[in-house]
Amino acid sequence: MKLTAENTFAAAVVPGVEDKFYYVISADCVMCASCAEACPVHAITEGDGRYEIDPERCIDCGTCSYVCPLGVPQPV
Ligand code: SF4
Ligand code: SF4
C-alpha cells in the first residue's frame, strides 16, 4: 500500500484503522538508542540485541529512521 498524506493521517489518529503503518527495527540495529530518545510518543524500547518499536504506539512519523545512523527503522 502506497504511503500518502491521507492514509498516514488515518493511521496516526484513527484507532483500529486497517492498514495502519508502523516502523520496525531489524537485526542491523547497533543499540545506539538515538531512535528511542527521538521518538515523540516513546514507542521504542531496548530489546534483546536490538531496539524494538511498539506498533500500537507508533504514529509512523519516521523520526526514528531519520535519526538512526544506519537508517535501520523502516516502515512496514
Ligand atoms: S516512526 Fe515515529 S512514532 Fe514510530 S517509532 Fe519511529 S519515531 Fe516513534
Ligand atoms: S537509532 Fe538505529 S542503530 Fe540506534 S538503536 Fe535505533 S535502530 Fe538501533
Image (spheres, rainbow, N blue to C red):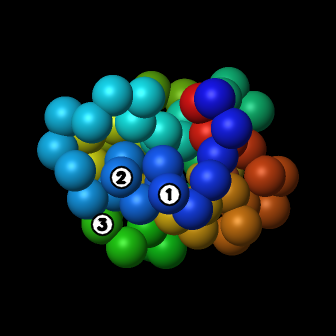
Mark 2: few/some/many CA within 10 Å (<14, 14-19, 20+): some
Q: Which tag, 2 or 3, sits closer to the chain's start?
A: 2
> What residue would you read off at disc 1?
6
Q: Quadrant of the C terminus?
A: top right
Residue 44: % across, % down = 39, 51
> What residue would you read off at disc 2?
10
Disc 3 beta carbon < 8 A from ligand 1? yes
Residue 18: % across, % down = 33, 28
The secondary element bearing badge 1 is classed as helix
Q: Which tag, 1 or 3, sits closer to the chain's start?
A: 1
Amino acid type, residue under disc 2 in the picture: Ala
Indicate which disc residue 56 carries. none
- Alpha-carbon span between mark 1 and mark 2: 6 Å
> What residue would you read off at disc 3?
41
Residue shown at 41% from the left, 60% from the top = 9
The answer to whether residue 10 of the structure is visible from this angle is: yes
